[in-house]
């Protein structure tokens, strides 16, 4: 690849030495963006300099993603200025952003699974008439050595482990020569080992003078990586901790500071903040609550060598056996897309078993339909809350009763008994603390956390005995997360829970045992405790590593 | 160590905090605007079109009023409503489930052919009330049967029903013609048509009017459909399936069964429309006869927001328009197809209003952001941006 074809490639390929404290690479001034009913970004001013990692911290819905969308050209701000290298710019499209040297790595992979690594990268070269494979591989080697990773250009993207896919995404973002790299929640899909590797890559890029915006909602990540930390809250920039503030403070001081920024109103907010501290620990220390469930405890759910078909790119289940006892919380860990959905749907009855048998309190239920299993007390809290869990256009009350359509006493001879439904809904809304203007409000107008509470009200009420929680706290704010985890813990009293989650910390915290799912198989079981995270991580990448994770290796 | 507070935090309104009532009033107004404005605009645009063609729009519209409402002609309009309303209700039933039964012509004509072929001999053998009931049931059965293949394919393989119903409709129309020209043709006449029902062997009229009871059947069907769709477990399942098929599967709705049943109900209602029209008005079926009621009904089904009661006034409006339109078009020396122009105009304005509504909901403007910013610039006060933090 010639320098002439890529005039800006110099800046990322052979970056200038780091000069901390230099003028900002990208500056945002007074950026505001609103959507109907929500001010996503309210007068945000913020900058990032060469050779620094600027962490953007905030809960879900704080406006992080909108801000990133504005920088990467997906959204336009309603007002405000963006400056790149001191010049006012207008980022009207992702193409503009790339031209200005702003590269973005999204939370979910944007690689085309069927194409090779090199082909995926060359997609960015479409401005040239002829694709030049040789110069592209040279560019890949160049960037690979900058990052300290080696990627086989001929491997098909879908064969890469997620950590490796992300490295390719980073290379893709830098491909046309970037000076700013934005990473959106980059660790959410990674194993602990892959996270380590990502940290190394980022520090190499930093040394090479790249500016990095690292978006996260995990406090310990921000504290560990950030040169500066900015906190967003309800669309506003609460404040920025500068370099001295970050590096000069002990982890405890830093934690206190950030918690204050995220939650502390002068009035009484601190009490709430203190409550949340457990969830926010900078030191990343977990409290394990695993309990030994007596071996004599009744088996409530048993999968016997269950196989189900996959759907699309997602694998099915292959010969899975699991047992859940009364009063037990069984976690299922795994990298996303390794059969989690198949497992949840097989147990809930939404997918037919190909082989094997399913037992509920000893009785076979493999042939029982969704409704039948619900009546038995087997419930499924779906991960796809909006796409599958609720009907957005229907009232909250009806959404709570969706799984009981036609049942007495809420329906009589097929006719809806609105008053019974409304009365019971009000009761449940209060008990589960759903914030809604009324039971008649359309479910689609609720926030994510409240939608989850509506679903919890549905799945945990009406004689529920065993509940499958699928990513129960994914994308929720910290307070709701805490509430949901408490509800899961409460299942120990006479019920049982199966938690399928990609959040390893969550599983380590609440479950009694953790089974690890990889490519549709259960590859092992781990008891939460010190060292468990690493053990689970090794199992998670277990057979995947044969393909990509271990070969090549990090720096 | 220094923290720079950007600005004192202000609560952000997550949801509009307006009281429930004013919101529901706003919703009703919005609904009325969206339903009525396209009709009014179409009438105005149609008037302008008439002016361009050198006709007097006022006299054209007053002719419609005259020929569609006054001097007992409202009874003709009412009778024209019967098949239109039954088809509309039949379509609403499946459209609510997000199923697109566009095979109404085939279902209607096949039902019409079978019942007018069998009707003349039936009425001579059994009492009239029984014959009429049986013929209604037969027509409903034929209409329902003609949806079986698309319904089954959709339920089993998720085959796109738009394509299959259109294909089946094509076959149904052809088959109806074969029946009318073949086994059901009246041997006494040379024109390909079925035997004509004697006048006294048709649907009886409502006392002291000329209106046949088929109109009552249609109104009754609309009311029942409204009740079923809004008050019963079945209706709620249909709504859930239509709004979110994945949620339907998740909550245990038997999706396949529901697809089959709503398709069959739709076909049955469309078949019944044929019975109301043949037994109430025509008395026989002709080959190559196709009133294409379904096509004209579809815009009104959407204007009524898939509400079986709300569709009644729209159907009444169109019935008046088409009954009176014959006279008006004749007086203005225009083809009766001009009325279809009015329907098309309604569709165009509906689309426009929907488009504008969507844009506004998304908070977008017709002006590109750059231009908008430039226009507003003098009014924007430049805010102090947060400068480099000063290390303490």
Image (tube, rainbow, N blue to C red):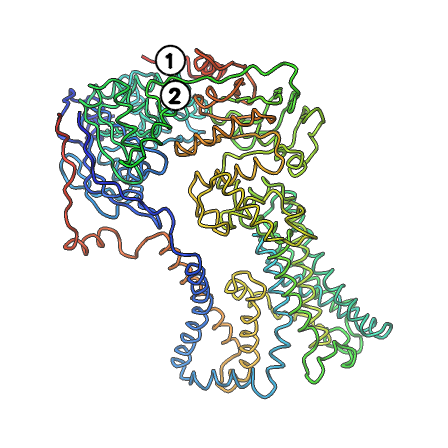
Identify which residue, B27 or B289, lies in the foreground.
Answer: B27
User: What separation in Å lies between label 1 and label 2 (alpha carbons)?
Assistant: 10 Å
**Residue that lies at the very extreme toward the right in this rendered image:** B125
Label 1 is found on which chain of the structure? A
Contact? badges 1 and 2 (CB < 8 Å)? yes
Residue A159 screen position, x and y as percent = 45, 22
Q: On the rendered structure, is A3 left or right of B329?
A: left
Residue A130 screen position, x and y as percent = 31, 33
| Upstream in sequence: badge 1 or badge 2 | 2
**Mark 2 secondary-structure assignment:** helix
CA neighbours of label 1 inside 10 A, class few (<14), some (14 to 19), many (20+): few
Q: Which mark is residue A552?
A: 1
Image quarter of the C terminus of chain A: top left
Identify which residue, A321 or A44, lies in the foreground.
Answer: A44
Residue B345 seen in render: no
Q: Residue at x 71, y 80 (%)?
A: B206
């Amino acid at each position: 690849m010639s320098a002439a074809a890529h005039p800006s490639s110099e800046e990322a390929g052979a970056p200038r030495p780091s000069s901390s404290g230099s003028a900002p690479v990208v500056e945002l001034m007074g950026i505001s963006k609103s959507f109907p009913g929500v001010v996503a970004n309210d007068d945000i001013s913020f900058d990032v300099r060469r050779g620094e990692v600027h962490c953007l911290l905030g809960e879900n819905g704080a406006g992080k993603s909108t801000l990133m969308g504005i920088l990467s050209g997906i959204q336009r701000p309603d007002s405000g200025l963006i400056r790149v290298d001191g010049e006012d710019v207008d980022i009207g499209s992702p193409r503009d952003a790339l031209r200005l040297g702003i590269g973005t790595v999204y939370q979910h992979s944007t690689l085309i699974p069927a194409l090779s690594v090199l082909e995926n990268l060359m997609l960015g070269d479409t401005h040239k008439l002829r694709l030049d494979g040789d110069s592209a591989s040279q560019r890949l080697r160049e960037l690979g050595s900058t990052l300290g990773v080696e990627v086989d250009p001929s491997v098909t993207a879908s064969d890469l482990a997620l950590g490796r896919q992300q490295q390719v995404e980073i290379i893709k973002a830098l491909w046309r020569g970037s000076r700013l790299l934005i990473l959106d929640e980059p660790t959410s899909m990674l194993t602990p080992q892959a996270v380590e590797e990502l940290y190394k890559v980022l520090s190499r890029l930093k040394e090479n003078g790249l500016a990095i915006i690292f978006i996260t909602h995990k406090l310990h990540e921000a504290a560990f990586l950030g040169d500066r930390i900015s906190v967003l809250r309800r669309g506003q920039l609460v404040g920025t901790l500068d370099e001295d503030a970050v590096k000069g403070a002990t982890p405890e001081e830093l934690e206190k500071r950030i918690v204050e920024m995220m939650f502390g109103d002068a009035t009484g907010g601190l009490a709430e903040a203190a409550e949340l501290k457990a969830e926010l620990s900078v030191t990343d220390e977990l409290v394990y609550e695993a309990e030994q469930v007596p071996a004599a405890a009744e088996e409530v759910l048993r999968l016997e060598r269950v196989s189900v078909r996959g759907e699309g790119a997602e694998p099915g289940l292959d010969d899975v056996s699991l047992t859940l006892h009364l009063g037990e919380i069984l976690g299922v860990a795994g990298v996303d897309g390794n059969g989690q959905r198949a497992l949840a749907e097989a147990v809930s009855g939404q997918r037919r078993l190909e082989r094997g048998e399913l037992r509920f309190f000893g009785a076979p239920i493999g042939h029982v339909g969704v409704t039948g299993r619900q009546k038995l007390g087997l419930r499924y809290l779906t991960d796809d809350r909006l796409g599958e869990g609720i009907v957005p256009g229907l009232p909250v009350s009806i959404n709570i009763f969706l799984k009981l359509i036609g049942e007495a006493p809420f329906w009589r001879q097929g006719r809806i008994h609105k008053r019974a439904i409304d009365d019971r809904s009000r009761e449940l809304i209060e008990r589960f603390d759903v914030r809604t203007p009324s039971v008649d409000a359309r479910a689609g107008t609720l926030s994510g956390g409240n939608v989850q509470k509506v679903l919890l009200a549905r799945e945990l009420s009406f004689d529920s005995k065993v509940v499958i929680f699928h990513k129960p706290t994914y994308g929720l704010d910290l307070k709701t997360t805490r509430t949901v985890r408490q509800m899961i813990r409460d299942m120990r009293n006479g019920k049982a829970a199966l938690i399928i989650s990609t959040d390893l910390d969550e599983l380590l915290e609440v479950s009694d045992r953790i089974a690890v799912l990889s490519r549709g198989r259960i590859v092992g079981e781990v008891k939460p405790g010190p060292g468990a995270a690493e053990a689970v991580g090794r199992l998670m990448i277990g057979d995947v590593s044969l393909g990509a994770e271990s070969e090549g290796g990090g720096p | 160590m220094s923290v720079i507070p950007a600005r004192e935090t202000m609560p952000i309104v997550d949801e509009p905090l307006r009281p429930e009532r004013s919101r529901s009033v706003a919703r009703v107004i919005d609904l009325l605007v969206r339903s009525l404005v396209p009709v009014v605009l179409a009438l105005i645009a149609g008037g302008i079109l008439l002016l361009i063609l050198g006709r007097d729009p006022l006299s054209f519209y007053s002719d419609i009023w005259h020929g569609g409402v006054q001097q007992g002609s409202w009874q003709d309009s009412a009778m024209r409503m019967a098949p239109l309303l039954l088809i509309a209700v039949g379509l609403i039933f499946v459209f609510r489930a997000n199923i697109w039964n566009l095979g109404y012509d085939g279902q209607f004509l096949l039902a019409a052919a079978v019942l007018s072929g069998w009707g003349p001999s039936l009425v001579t053998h059994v009492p009239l009330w029984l014959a009429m009931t049986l013929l209604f049931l037969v027509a409903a059965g034929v209409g329902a049967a003609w949806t079986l293949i698309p319904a089954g394919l959709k339920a089993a393989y998720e085959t796109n029903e738009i394509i299959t119903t259109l294909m089946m409709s094509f076959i149904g129309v052809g088959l109806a013609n074969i029946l009318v020209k073949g086994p059901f043709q009246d041997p006494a006449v040379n024109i390909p048509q079925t035997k004509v029902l004697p006048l006294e062997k048709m649907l009886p009229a409502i006392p002291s009017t000329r209106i046949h009871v088929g109109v009552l059947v249609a109104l009754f069907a609309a009311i029942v459909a409204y009740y079923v769709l809004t008050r019963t477990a079945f209706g709620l399942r249909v709504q859930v399936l239509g709004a979110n098929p994945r949620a339907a599967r998740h909550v245990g709705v038997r999706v396949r069964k529901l697809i089959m049943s709503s398709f069959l109900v739709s076909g049955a209602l469309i078949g019944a429309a044929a019975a109301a029209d043949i037994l109430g008005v025509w008395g026989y079926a002709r080959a190559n006869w196709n009133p294409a009621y379904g096509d004209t009904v579809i815009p009104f089904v959407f204007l009524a927001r898939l509400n079986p009661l709300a569709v009644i006034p729209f159907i009444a409006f169109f019935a008046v328009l088409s009954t009176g339109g014959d006279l008006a078009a004749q007086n203005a020396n225009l083809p009766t197809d001009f009325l279809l122009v009015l329907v098309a105009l309604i569709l165009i304005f509906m689309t426009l209003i929907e488009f504008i509504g969507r844009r506004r909901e998304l908070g977008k403007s017709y002006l590109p952001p750059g231009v908008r910013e430039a226009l507003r610039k003098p009014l924007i006060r430049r805010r102090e941006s947060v400068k480099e933090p000063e290390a303490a």
